[in-house]
């Protein structure tokens, strides 16, 4: 190959006679290449392999055509990890957004005292913290669509299927979403003066983490069905608006229209997060009735000019002791979203 020559162009000129000025010379060069190849040891080895037993060929070819499932998943996980800290859109911008939201929430509902006048603001803060956290998961849409485009190309080349892609996508999000949940809670929980115990704090973090995980799973599902940025964004925003409407805060489950209650309320992941956070705050706390001892909620502590938080939960139809069941339902919803996302990704070829 001549000096300062592009290797690709040199090889094309060497093996193709279509653009040669001297076609006869190009043909002689090609025949010489063919003859040299036929006489080479590599050509004899390949001929012997092709003529060998078919079962042996299938095994050898099969082993080389696609890497083992676990290896592929780990490789995708490693690549996703590198991309996640290089790509600020995937989690960096979202992290900054959640920090800003945490500061705003912490200062708006600043140091609420445990009195009956704060029961409404506490409830509003719980709804805001849970609903808007999952709503802001829409920021993950462009990052997932970019990953999905890469997957479509690599699957077309026969490298791997939908399962390792979806598993790696799920696993890479876990530490980032937990970190967001923890930092958000560290800022808001104590500024808002929610129930000041370690158990209550980490229960809040757990619900927030499940909320974000469900929100991101919804993004994966919708973006897999409608892999167009504007369409996916609109549908996810609509779904979150629906979940907010039937989640139990804007309209109590006790008086919610039966259609919305039985068709959507019980599959609304935001509803279970709201329930869990409400029980975490009101299920084990007592509030002062204030001046004049006019208690908004009647409880066994009314004679002491106090309100048992259980009375607040009764207005919503909630009760303590169901946290484990609600966590199980949340995990089931997340699993269904991810499985549906895998099914759609597996079936769609473009």
Image: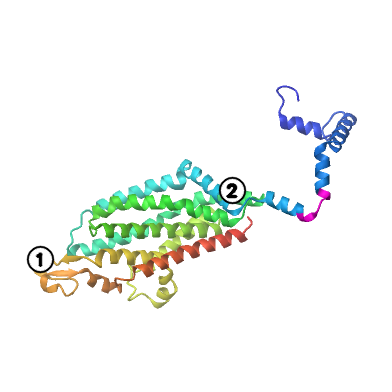
Is 220 on the left-hand or right-hand side of 245? Answer: right
Residue at image point 44% right, 47% down: 91
Q: Which residue is mark 1?
A: 291
Contact flag, marks 1 and 2 (Cβ < 8 Å) = no
Residue at 25%, 66% in the rendered image: 282
- The residue under label 2 is 150
- Within 10 Å of the Cα at label 2, are there few (<14), some (14-19), or many (20+) other Cα atoms? few
Give the colouring mode of the picture.
Answer: rainbow
* Residue 22 horizontal side relative to residue 186, left or right: right
- Quick one: 30 or 25, which is closer to the camera? 30
Image quadrant holding the C terminus, namely bottom right
Horizontally, residue 250 falls left or right of residue 229, namely left
The picture places residue 105, in percent across and down from the top left corner, at 29, 53
Report the front residue among 180 and 56: 56
Q: Which residues are magenta?
A: 50-55
Cα separation between marks 1 and 2:
64 Å
Residue furthest to the top in view is 3
Label placed on residue 72: none
Q: Nearer the viewer, mark 1 or mark 2?
A: 2
Q: Residue at x 9, y 68 (%)?
A: 292
The N terminus, quarter of image:
top right
Image check: 82 left or right of 258? right
């Amino acid at each position: 190959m001549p000096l300062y020559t592009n290797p690709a162009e040199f090889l094309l000129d060497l093996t193709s006679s279509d653009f040669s000025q001297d076609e006869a010379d190009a043909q002689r060069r090609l025949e010489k290449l063919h003859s040299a190849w036929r006489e080479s040891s590599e050509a004899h080895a390949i001929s012997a392999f092709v003529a060998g037993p078919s079962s042996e060929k299938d095994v050898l070819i099969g082993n080389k055509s696609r890497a083992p499932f676990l290896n592929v998943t780990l490789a995708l996980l490693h690549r996703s990890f590198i991309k996640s800290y290089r790509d600020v859109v995937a989690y960096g911008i979202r992290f900054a957004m959640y920090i800003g939201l945490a500061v705003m929430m912490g200062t708006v509902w600043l140091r609420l005292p445990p009195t009956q006048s704060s029961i409404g603001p506490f409830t509003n803060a719980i709804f805001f913290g849970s609903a808007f956290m999952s709503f802001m998961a829409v920021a993950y849409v462009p990052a997932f669509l970019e990953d999905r485009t890469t997957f479509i190309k690599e699957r077309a080349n026969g490298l791997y299927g939908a399962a390792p892609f979806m598993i790696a996508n799920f696993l890479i999000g876990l530490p980032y979403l937990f970190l967001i949940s923890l930092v958000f809670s560290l800022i808001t929980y104590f500024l808002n003066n929610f129930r000041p115990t370690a158990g209550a704090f980490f229960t809040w973090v757990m619900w927030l983490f499940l909320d974000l995980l469900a929100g991101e799973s919804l993004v994966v599902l919708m973006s897999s069905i409608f892999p167009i940025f504007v369409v996916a964004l609109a549908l996810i925003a609509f779904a979150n608006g629906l979940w907010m409407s039937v989640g139990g805060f804007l309209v109590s489950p006790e008086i919610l229209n039966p259609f919305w209650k039985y068709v959507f309320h019980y599959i609304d992941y935001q509803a279970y997060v709201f329930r869990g956070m409400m029980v975490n705050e009101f299920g084990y706390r007592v509030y002062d009735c204030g001046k004049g001892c006019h208690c908004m909620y009647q409880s066994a502590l009314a004679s002491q000019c106090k309100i048992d938080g259980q009375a607040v939960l009764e207005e919503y139809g909630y009760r303590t002791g169901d946290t484990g069941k609600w966590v199980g339902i949340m995990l089931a919803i997340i699993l269904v979203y991810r499985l549906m996302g895998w099914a759609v990704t597996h079936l769609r070829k473009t």
